[in-house]
């Protein structure tokens, strides 16, 4: 197999050679660029990764990153910043950089970062958004969620209708918003309708609008959600609750891209993208005569199945860290080992929505301190406590009376590292650590 190729962009020739020697000794091929403009041109050639210094002449690393991702959004980029230049590192990550390294670069860390990215390239970096981080809310390390992200990326580039299936609380609306934000409709409206929350007698008017006098109480013309979504995306949540009669009208509107308001005769044409979602088994509903088969196939041009949280336990802690950062921006609290163990063991029947509620409650009780098991609801709290029969926590995480925090931490890191196949990047994210902090702890605890 041909060697993977890394582009090293740095205006310091000696530094370029040093980095190249370190990567070539790891059986990687290297190419070189002395400034940002040269890096952008070189990125058009076959490459597997770009190592990009932030401070370069002609075009700095941030500008080069923007232009590289315009041309090749799938190409992973790692930026190199001066010590303490956190602002530029954060800006680069927002623009889609996969990771960053600080000078002076630790060679072992460099090789680890590059190897981890090349081993598991993952989905292409998602387009950063102005004022919204919704596309980045599909957080997790599992293969199941990686497949969802890849399907979202592909669906966003088309105009096909999408059906998102999954249990309540799995984040179906987040998937719909991600598709919208990553599409060329992102400047248009995103309009959501919960078909189960609107009374059956009003849902048709809610969707298609009505003319004055269409029914008792219709004192003026009303624009429906289809028209409100013109130029953007219409999200129909709980589509499985829609009555068969209205399903017929929805199918016709999807086929013809036009409809009449209630009480009207003039066709209204709209340019919309429809994403529907359900927690129902629509195939069973079709067999029972409750859902139209032709509508199902019209909606499920792209079919996305969101796995429940209990089937992707490696996503629990990264999702928890992400939710904590959203619940308390700027100062997300740390999860204590017992609390983290409890969260990882719980089955989460309410999925991500339940996890969010649990963390919001925990923040209330923890204040600005560490979230401990005692801050969790009673049913969860017990999962992080020792098992009286065995003297160990329920998952042998090392949380036992009289055991030092260092021992608990070592066992938790070792277990997470094993469960993720030795991948240090994913382990660091799962534990809410920076890679540098994880490498330090691996050395300290002599873990390999």
Image (cartoon, rainbow, N blue to C red):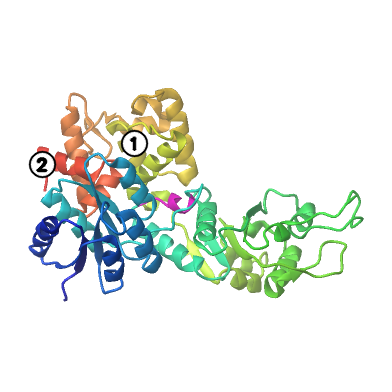
Q: Above or below — where is 57 with respect to 295?
A: above
Residue 26 x/y as whole percent:
10, 62
Q: Above or below — where is 350 with respect to 119?
A: above
Helix, strand or loop for disc 1? helix
Residue 431 x/y as whole percent:
28, 42
Which disc, if any, is residue 109? none
Q: Residues within 10 Å of mark 1 (few under 14, many from 20)?
A: many
Decide which of 347, 220 is in the foreground and name it.
220
Location of the N terminus by quadrant is bottom left
Residue 246 x/y as whole percent:
74, 63
**Does residue 447 belong to the magenta stretch?**
no
Q: Residues within 10 Å of mark 2 (few under 14, many from 20)?
A: few
Q: Nearer the viewer, mark 1 or mark 2?
A: 2
Q: Disc 2 marks which residue?
A: 443
Helix, strand or loop for disc 2? helix
Q: Above or below — where is 367 with respect to 274?
A: above
Q: Which residues are magenta?
A: 134-140
357 sits to left or right of 295? left
Q: Residue at x 62, y 72 (%)?
A: 298
Q: Residue at x 16, y 33 (%)?
A: 407
Q: Residue at x 81, y 62 (%)?
A: 261
130 sits to left or right of 274? left
Residue 133 x/y as whole percent:
47, 49
Decide which of 215, 30 is in the foreground and name it.
30
Q: Is residue 349 visible?
A: no
Which disc, if any, is residue 342? 1
Would you identify the image quadrant in which residue 442 lies?
A: top left
Disc 1/disc 2 C-alpha distance (Å) = 27 Å
Q: Of marks 1 and 2, which one's residue comes earlier in the chain?
A: 1
Decide which of 170, 206 is in the foreground and name it.
206
Q: Is residue 159 visible?
A: yes
């Amino acid at each position: 197999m041909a060697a993977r190729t890394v582009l090293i962009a740095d205006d310091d020739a000696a530094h370029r050679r040093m980095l190249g020697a370190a990567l070539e000794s790891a059986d990687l091929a290297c190419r070189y660029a002395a400034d940002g403009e040269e890096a952008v041109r070189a990125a058009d050639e076959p490459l597997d990764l770009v190592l990009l210094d932030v401070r370069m002449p002609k075009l700095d690393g941030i500008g080069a990153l923007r232009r590289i991702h315009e041309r090749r959004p799938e190409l992973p980029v790692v930026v190199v910043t001066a010590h303490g230049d956190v602002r530029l590192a954060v800006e680069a990550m927002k623009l889609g950089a996969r990771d960053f390294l600080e000078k002076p670069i630790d060679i072992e860390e460099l090789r680890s970062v590059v190897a981890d990215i090349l081993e598991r390239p993952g989905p292409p970096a998602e387009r950063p958004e102005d004022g919204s981080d919704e596309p980045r809310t599909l957080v997790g390390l599992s293969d199941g969620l990686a497949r969802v992200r890849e399907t979202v990326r592909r669906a966003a580039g088309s105009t096909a209708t999408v059906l998102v299936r999954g249990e309540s609380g799995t984040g179906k609306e987040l998937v719909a918003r991600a598709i919208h934000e990553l599409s060329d409709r992102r400047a248009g409206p995103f309009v959501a309708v919960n078909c189960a929350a609107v009374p059956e007698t009003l849902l048709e008017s809610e969707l298609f609008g009505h003319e004055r006098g269409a029914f008792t109480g219709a004192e003026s013309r009303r624009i429906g959600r289809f028209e409100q979504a013109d130029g953007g995306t219409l999200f129909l949540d709980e589509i499985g609750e829609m009555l068969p009669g209205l399903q017929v009208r929805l199918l016709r509107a999807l086929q013809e891209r036009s409809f009449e308001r209630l009480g009207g005769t003039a066709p209204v044409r709209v340019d919309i993208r429809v994403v529907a979602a359900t927690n129902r088994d629509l195939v069973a509903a079709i067999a029972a005569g409750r859902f139209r088969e032709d509508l199902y196939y019209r909606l499920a041009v792209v079919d996305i199945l969101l796995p429940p949280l209990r089937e992707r336990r490696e996503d629990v802690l990264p999702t928890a860290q992400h939710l904590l950062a959203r619940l308390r921006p700027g100062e997300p609290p740390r999860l204590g080992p017992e609390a983290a163990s409890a969260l990882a063991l719980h089955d989460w029947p309410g999925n991500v929505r339940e996890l969010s509620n649990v963390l919001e409650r925990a923040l209330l009780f923890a204040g600005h301190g560490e979230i401990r098991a005692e801050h969790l609801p009673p049913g969860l709290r017990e999962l992080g406590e020792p098992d009286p029969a065995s003297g160990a926590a329920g998952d042998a995480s090392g949380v036992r009376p009289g055991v030092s925090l260092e021992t608990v931490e070592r066992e938790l890191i070792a277990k997470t590292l094993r469960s993720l196949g030795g991948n240090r990047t994913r382990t660091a994210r799962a534990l809410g650590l920076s890679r540098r902090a994880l490498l330090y702890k691996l050395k300290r605890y002599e873990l390999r």
